[in-house]
Image (spheres, grey):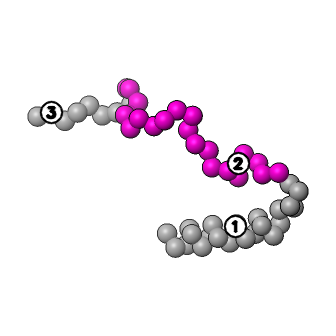
Amino acid sequence: MLITVANNHFLDQWRHTHQPPDEPITPADTPQTPVEPFDDTPPTGQSRPPPTP
């Protein structure tokens, strides 16, 4: 986990120094949120059946 956080920090620093200030932010740079709210139910036909009692 520490290596991932450190790597992300180094990448952010590199982008900050190498990205021109007038370059617009691309959609890939911003986190995307789902359009519909997440209802926490599994998709139909892709989940396991409930355990037998």
Q: Position of residue 35 (x, y in %)?
A: 57, 34
Asked whether the residues under the numbered discs 1 and 2 touch, taking CB atoms below 8 Å apart as contact, a structural biologist would say no
Mark drawn on residue 48:
none
What's drawn in magenta, residue-wise?
24-45
Classify mark 2: residues with Cα within 10 Å, few (<14), some (14-19) or many (20+). Answer: few
Name the N-terminal-most of marks 2 and 3.
Answer: 2
Q: Which of the 4 quarters of the picture holds residue 39?
A: top left
Image position of 49 with respect to 21: above or below = above
Q: Which amino acid does label 1 sit on?
A: Leu
The residue that disc 3 covers is 52
Mark drawn on residue 11:
1
Q: Distance between the residues labelled 2 and 3?
A: 44 Å
Q: What element carries label 1?
A: helix
Give the prevailing secondary structure in the magenta stretch. loop
Q: Residue at x 37, y 26 (%)?
A: 45
Name the N-terminal-most of marks 3 and 1.
Answer: 1
Name the N-terminal-most of marks 1 and 2.
Answer: 1
Q: What element carries label 3?
A: loop
Q: Which amino acid does label 2 sit on?
A: Ala
The residue that disc 2 covers is 28
Q: Which residue is drawn at 38% across and 26% down?
A: 44
Asked whether the residues under the numbered discs 2 and 3 touch, taking CB atoms below 8 Å apart as contact, a structural biologist would say no
Q: Residue at x 52, y 32 (%)?
A: 36
Please state if 53 lies on the left or on the right of 6 as rendered: left
Q: Which of marks 2 and 3 is in front?
A: 2
Q: What element carries label 2?
A: helix
Q: Where is residue 38 in the image (x, y as percent from the top left)?
A: 45, 37
Q: Residue furthest left?
A: 53
Q: Where is residue 4 in the image (x, y as percent from the top left)?
A: 56, 68
